[in-house]
Image (cartoon, grey):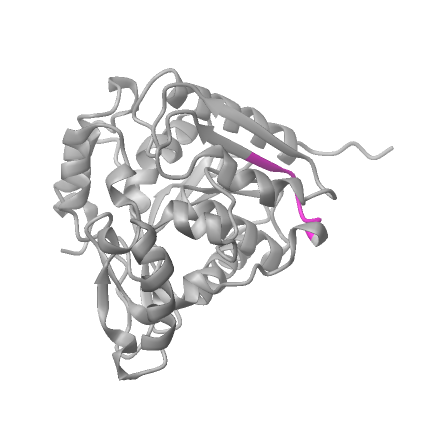
């Protein structure tokens, strides 16, 4: 498998979305390959030279770029944006180079580097979106790059907090015992041992529709994926690029699904309340699950993100 044109799973998931959000035949994103370090990173793209803003979309630990493109990248492209969804190393169709033991820090670096690659093409303003754990990834990428105009995330939580790990993990055992075990294993020859993500995190709460969940869980490029103990250890022990009190790069929007049974609002609030140097706004998505299939939350998400991006990326008049 080399392209999403050859992968049937994302099309099955499409059937659970409202018809207006389904990508019709002939409307699929372009597919590009970007060489990064030893990896061939897959990009879904809706290129639009007339667009005044580019949005780069990051998935989380249970999804891939095509799945995020469906719920947000494609709707934004229809509204005039240039949309780019990246498959991070270990997910989607990205090909990890031989001998590359992927870490979460690699994700942050790759995110920053893809911004540089896009700015090398042209100087249009760039905004970011992060689904699930991708929300915190947008924060780290923005802090490292310092070249984006705004970030939107579904969650912004700090894995250093025990209550966060307890809530997001599959259960208390995996949080209190499995987490520390990952750190120990990462320092041994077992660092490359692969762990099913559904065994480590609360993947059964990825989506509220049981039929859709079954499709996600059988997909080895997203919710059915497995990652190494080294990656999981680096993710769980990651320290933000800058502490929230020092974040001054750009405004932030949290789009929180109201029926999210995996990462509820109280996981993001403590971290976001510490951010004081830039505007922070929260929009609740009525009736929507973690991966939002449901209305009216799905449309609220697209409309609020569109309005936010237009605000933060608008040209500033010189007074």
Q: Is residue 222 visible?
A: yes
Q: Is residue 107 left or right of residue 125?
A: left
Picture layout, residue 90 above or below residue 77 = below
Q: Check if residue 93 falls in the magenta segment.
A: no
- What residue sits 40% from the left and 43% below the top? 132
Q: Is residue 125 visible?
A: no
- Name, please, the residue furthest toward the bottom: 189
Disc tally is 0
Query: Within the image, what quadrant is residue 82 found in?
Result: top left
> Quick one: quadrant of the C terminus?
top right
Picture layout, residue 188 above or below residue 303 = below
Between residue 211 and residue 85, name the one nearer to us: 211
Q: Is residue 246 left or right of residue 255?
A: right
What secondary structure is the magenta-colored segment mainly?
A: loop
Q: Whole-percent x and y of residue 239?
A: 55, 63
- What residue sits 47% from the left and 57% below the top? 111
- Name, please, the residue furthest toward the top: 296
- Name, please, the residue furthest toward the right: 319
> Quick one: quadrant of the N terminus?
bottom left
Q: Is residue 279 left or right of residue 193?
A: right
Q: Which residues are magenta?
A: 247-253
Q: Whole-percent x and y of residue 205?
A: 28, 37
Q: Whole-percent x and y of residue 105?
A: 46, 66
Query: Within the image, what quadrant is residue 261 found in?
Result: top left
- What residue sits 78% from the left and 31% below the top? 317
Between residue 223 and residue 80, name the one nearer to us: 223
- What residue sits 42% from the left and 67% below the top? 234
């Amino acid at each position: 498998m080399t392209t999403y044109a050859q992968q049937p799973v994302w099309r099955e998931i499409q059937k659970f979305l409202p018809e207006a959000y389904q990508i019709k035949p002939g409307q699929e994103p372009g597919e590009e390959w970007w060489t990064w370090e030893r990896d061939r990173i897959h990009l879904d793209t809706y290129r639009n030279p007339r667009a005044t803003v580019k949005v780069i979309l990051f998935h989380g630990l249970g999804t891939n770029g095509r799945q995020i493109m469906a719920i947000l990248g494609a709707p934004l492209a229809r509204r005039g944006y240039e949309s780019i969804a990246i498959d991070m190393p270990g997910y989607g169709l990205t090909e990890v180079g031989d001998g590359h033991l992927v870490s979460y820090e690699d994700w942050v670096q790759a995110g920053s580097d893809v911004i540089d690659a896009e700015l090398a093409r042209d100087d249009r303003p760039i905004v970011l979106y992060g689904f699930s754990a991708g929300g915190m990834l947008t924060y780290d990428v923005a802090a490292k790059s310092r070249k984006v105009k705004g970030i939107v995330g579904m969650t912004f939580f700090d894995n250093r907090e025990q209550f966060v790990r307890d809530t997001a993990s599959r259960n208390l055992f995996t949080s209190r015992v499995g987490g520390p075990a990952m750190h120990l294993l990462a320092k041994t020859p077992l660092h490359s041992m692969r762990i099913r993500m559904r065994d480590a995190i609360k993947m059964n709460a990825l989506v509220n529709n049981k039929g859709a969940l079954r499709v996600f869980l059988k997909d080895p490029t997203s919710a059915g994926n497995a990652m190494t103990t080294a990656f999981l250890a680096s993710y769980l022990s990651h320290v933000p690029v800058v502490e929230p009190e020092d974040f001054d790069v750009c405004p932030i929007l949290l789009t929180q699904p109201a029926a999210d049974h995996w990462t509820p609002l109280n996981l993001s609030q403590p971290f976001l309340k510490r951010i004081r140097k830039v505007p922070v706004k929260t929009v609740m998505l009525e009736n929507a699950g973690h991966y939002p299939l449901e209305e009216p939350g799905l449309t609220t998400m697209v409309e609020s993100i569109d309005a936010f991006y237009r605000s933060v990326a608008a040209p500033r008049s010189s007074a």
